[in-house]
Amino acid sequence: MARHMNPGSSTNKTIDAIDRKRERERRYLLKRSREMAPELAILLVQRLMDQHIIETDSVQAIKDMVERQLERVGDLDEFDVQFKIAPIRNLVPDPNLISLYLTQYITEDLINHDNIQDVFGDDLAIYNAVDSVLSRIRLQ
C-alpha cells in the first residue's frame, strides 16, 4: 500500500516555527532598541567615527538623530521598514533588521544632514559597523 503524505506535515510546522522565532526576535529587537536608544546611539556614533565612516562637526547632533531613529523604528509600519531596507535586504545572510534600517538611514538620509561632512565606505562596511554595536541586543 502506498504511503499517504499529509501536506500539512512537519515541513509546514518547521516553517511556522522559524517564522514565529523571527517575529519574536523582531519584536524583541524593536523593544530593546527603544529602551537602549541613548546608550546605543552614543556607542554607534562613536563606532562610526572610529572606523572613519562618518565625518561630522557635531557629534551631539548626529547622536540625537540616531537616537530618534532607534526610538522611532518600532512605530513604523512593517511596509515602511521593508520599503526602507529593500535595496540592501540581501546584504548579509542573517541580517539584523535594525542594523539594516540604520545602514540605509545613514546612506540615504543622514548623509544629507547639515552636520555631516561625508559618509565613507560601502553598504557592507556601514552595516558591519552598525551591527557590531547592535548585535548586543539580539536574542541569545
Image (cartoon, grey):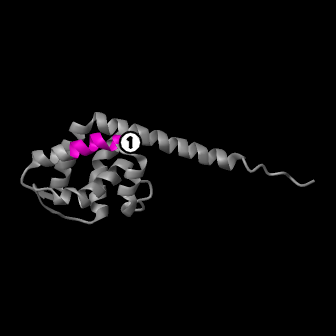
95 lies left or right of 17? left
67 lies left or right of 96? left
Residue situated in front as seen by the camera: 80 or 94: 80
Residue shown at the point (26%, 45%) measured from the top left: 69
Residue position marked by numbered label 1 in the rendering: 138
Residue situated in front as seen by the camera: 135 or 114: 114
- In magenta, the rendered stretch is 66-75
- Which quarter of the image is occupied by the C terminus? top left
Magenta run includes residue 34: no
| Secondary structure mainly formed by the magenta segment | helix
Residue 2 visible in rendering: yes
x and y percent of residue 41 in the render? 21, 43
Q: Amino acid at mark 1?
A: Arg
Residue shown at the point (12%, 47%) measured from the top left: 61
Residue shown at the point (58%, 43%) measured from the top left: 17
Residue shown at the point (33%, 42%) measured from the top left: 136
Label 1 SS: loop
Which residue is the extreme one toward the left?
57
Q: Is residue 93 above or below residue 25?
A: below
Q: Residues within 10 Å of mark 1 (few under 14, many from 20)?
A: some
